[in-house]
Image (cartoon, rainbow, N blue to C red):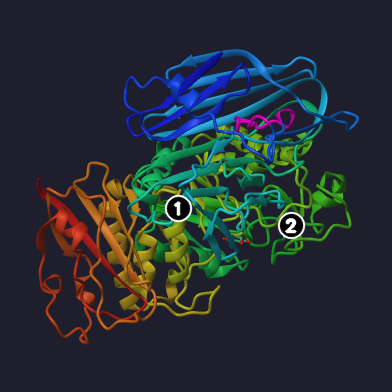
Amino acid sequence: MMKTWHLGDDRQSLVLASRENRLPEVIYWGPALPDGEALEPLAAAAIMDVTGGMVDENAPISLSPEASWTFPGQTGLTVRDAEGAVLRPNFVFHSEEQSGNQITLTYADVECGLTIIFDLSFTTETSLLRLQTRLQSKNDIIVDWLAAPVLPAPAHTNEMIEFSGRWCSEFQTRRLPFAPGARVRDNRTGRTDHAHFPGLIVCSKATSNTAGEAYAFHYGWSGGHKMVAEELADGRRQVQFGHATSSMAKGKSFETAPLYATFSDSGFNGTAIRFQRHVRTQIVRDARMPRPVHYNCWEAIYFDHKLDDLKSIADRAAELGAERFVLDDGWFGRRDDDTTSLGDWTIDPRKYPNGLTPLIDHVSSLGLEFGIWYEPEMINEDSDLYRTHPEWILGSKDQTRGRQQLVLDMARQDVRDYLFEQMSAVLGAHKIGYVKWDHNRVLPIVDAAQTDGVYELFDRLRVAFPHIEFESCSSGGGRIDFGILERTQRVWLSDSNDALERQRIQHDAALFLPASVTGSHVGPRHCHTSGRVIGMSLRAWTAAQRHMGFEMDPRELTPQEAETLMAVTQWWKANRDWLMSADILRLDAVDPAVIAEIQVAEDGQKFAAFAALTRPSDQILPYPVRLTGLDPQAFYKISLANRDEAHHLSRGAPLLKSQDISVSGQYLMSHGLTLPWRFPETIWVIEGQKVSS
Ligand code: GLA
């Protein structure tokens, strides 16, 4: 007895089969199968052989591989009864529901009193799978591990790209071979974290940005995830994602976060643009268009808030082109440094004797929206809140502090009510359109209830203040995932405003994130986190590649720097309508010193390409930059947006240095653009406009 199901579109197919009413397994995932392909024969044909040194039947890599079937690898569920005895459920078919590309499959083990439910859906617009597992029990149980629906990784895809990082260097990618055994990431920080972006790309050795097969995964959860990428002794491979081990409390009902996944045969760009589009159109809600240019005062003044300074900074930021002014840390309690006042979300009367209204009025009179910083989940011992409610903290009293602070127990209703009231009092009484929501330490204990509590507070505030946009920050990019992006409209990608570091970070983050949510700021001339001095052109263009903003004290700018920044900001404003919904495609630069990408408009009529030379090249002259994502038959008018930056040491005559050119998409993608020589730590910005096809 065989049951089969299909999800997909004309780009990819995912086929599931269930034999003898056992848990279903993915028997095919890859390029779209032809219409009319019979699925049952595929399921029968996929049954693998048995030989010596193994049990008499291969346990399937089902949506939750079962111990009860002697599965020879990591199981999809590890569960105990309330007394701690291990349960080994043996699930059988209970019911199914399918409507188009949405399937719910329910399986039960009556003896154990357990029901497992798989919600599988496929969004055709973005060609993306969304997979979730739910577990229900008659009695209280302890769930140590519950995987979202488990997917196989095909044998010919023998490598994986996974993500690590640190403060100021988020989204580091690492390409590893599959090998026997499990590659396990179990993030015990309680947040998404800089070091554990919950993503994975399975690919072949030959897969590049522009070509080859890629299977990409993202677990949409902000509380820390576990990933297992395992090669079994029989050669099969599986990929599992779920909450960090043992982060769920004893109970009767459990669910994973959604696992997003997609297959593409057009390289990493193929999967990247699916995620980018999905974030823009399916995940993020109510983002204000056009995306306003930010000004954030953190690196200008830190905790030293003075009304007159802030006003003159706002004046200057407005002249430069800012449209939103974000007052960062330091406005509340008695917050003169980072040892105090988290939890006391009332305006500091010493710094703001007449409240925030004089500053907000001033900022508004300049035509800027006002935004404000919060770190709601945190508490300092030196705070009125701690003195009143020391019992509200998460974890023990003698735990190690992080940035001298403790964490509030967000699972408590009274804690959430307090935060809602404190925040509402300020947000409701002022003209505030934006909140930067920070989270500056790892958690003392890993508990999904903490994340559920945070989500609930976000959701409540969003209902109460629907006009307010939220930004997710966590010492930079410590909380970036689709779970938080369902509640926010922007992420602070990194605390590094060093343009060279930012080039690398935002390039790798584009594997999942569109420009419209990715904050990127022009920092101080002398970078506060790297100590480097980088020219204004590279700093400004780097910010203009994403959601643009400024974060330096604008009064430090020389007239020349201000002129460059204003020009780039004007360029960004003139183009943001299409840039913020463009696809970001990463280019396979031949020169390892170059980081390059192209942003192609939704309608394919325009593009902007950016080629940053991050360090001196080994060879004397620049290699041509090959573009991608264009219509090979169309012709494009190409110009250099920053042609005036050509250096006098560029003595030759590449045509683009002096004039625009008109060439085919085929030429641009096959030969590539010959660019003028230039210094390291600079960037060429190329604009393209389709002229005919
Ligand atoms: C974190 C953020 C910064 C800034 C500070 C304020 O480090 O990442 O952008 O808001 O907190 O304390």
Estimate the x, y position of residue 421 in percent, counting from the top left: 69, 38
- Location of the N terminus by quadrant is top right
Q: Earlier in the sequence, mark 2 or mark 1?
A: 2
Residue position for label 1: 518
* Residue found at x 38% / y 71%: 592
Q: In this image, 196 relative to 263: left or right?
A: right
The quarter of the displayed image where residue 684 is located: bottom left
* Residue found at x 30% / y 82%: 619
Amino acid type at image mark 1: Thr
* Residue found at x 25% / y 58%: 627
Amino acid type at image mark 2: Ser
Between 88 and 165, the one nearer to me in the picture: 88
Task: Using the rendered image of the protein, determine whether residue 553 is visible from the camera's viewpoint.
Answer: no
Q: Dot 2: what SS?
A: loop
Residue position for label 2: 341
Estimate the x, y position of residue 488 in percent, counting from the top left: 52, 42
* Residue found at x 56% / y 28%: 25
Between 234 and 191, the one nearer to me in the picture: 234
Relative to 62, does residue 586 appear above or below in the rendering?
A: below
Estimate the x, y position of residue 68 in percent, counting from the top left: 74, 28
Between 510 and 200, the one nearer to me in the picture: 200
Magenta residue span: 56-69
Q: In this image, 284 relative to 627: left or right?
A: right
Badge 2: few (under 14), some or many (20 or more) residues near its Cα, within 10 Å? many
Toward the front, the furthest residue is 52
- Location of the C terminus by quadrant is top left
Task: Using the rendered image of the protein, determine whether residue 66 is visible from the camera's viewpoint.
Answer: yes
Between 157 and 657, the one nearer to me in the picture: 157
